[in-house]
Image (cartoon, rainbow, N blue to C red):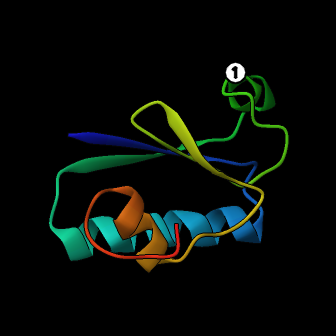
Amino acid sequence: MKQILILGTGCPKCEQLARNATLAVGQLGIEAEVTKVTKIDDIMKHGVMMTPGLVIDGQVKSVGKVPSAEDIRAMLGGGEGRA
């Protein structure tokens, strides 16, 4: 099962990233857990200094922007995207 972390304090961009990640997982039909990480100390443990951040299976994939569901699908290995 894929582990997807959404790093952010709950801003609108963080919420949109969570929606896009959930949509991408649903479109791919894969097993994944999407978890929001909102504590600054926990976010910084990933080396992320700007939110939102996207972490997939322990690897930081995006910082400071909101990748589309298409881009996230590509990051998850499910097809083409601009990732």
Residue 1 x %, y %: 20, 40
Q: Inspect the image, locate mark 1, and give the three-letter code of the amino acid beneath it.
A: Lys
Picture residue at 66% right of the left edge, 69% below the top: 66
Picture residue at 71% right of the left edge, 49% below the top: 8
Picture residue at 77% right of the left edge, 62% below the top: 11
Q: Mark 1, residues whose alpha carbon is within 10 Å: few (<14), some, or many (≥20)?
A: few
Is residue 16 toward the left or the right of residue 22 in the image?
Answer: right
Is residue 70 toward the left or the right of residue 78 in the image?
Answer: right
Is residue 80 toward the left or the right of residue 58 in the image?
Answer: left
Picture residue at 84% right of the left edge, 47% below the top: 50
Residue 57 x %, y %: 39, 35
| Count of numbered marks | 1
Decide which of 9, 60 is in the foreground and name it.
60
Decide which of 42, 53 is in the foreground and name it.
53
Q: Mark 1 points at which residue?
A: 45
| Secondary structure under the numbered disc 1 in the rendered image | loop
Residue 56 x %, y %: 44, 43
Q: Is 60 above or below relative to 27?
A: above
Q: Quadrant of residue 3 in the image?
A: top left
Of all residues shown, which one is farthest toward the right? 49
Residue 53 x %, y %: 66, 49
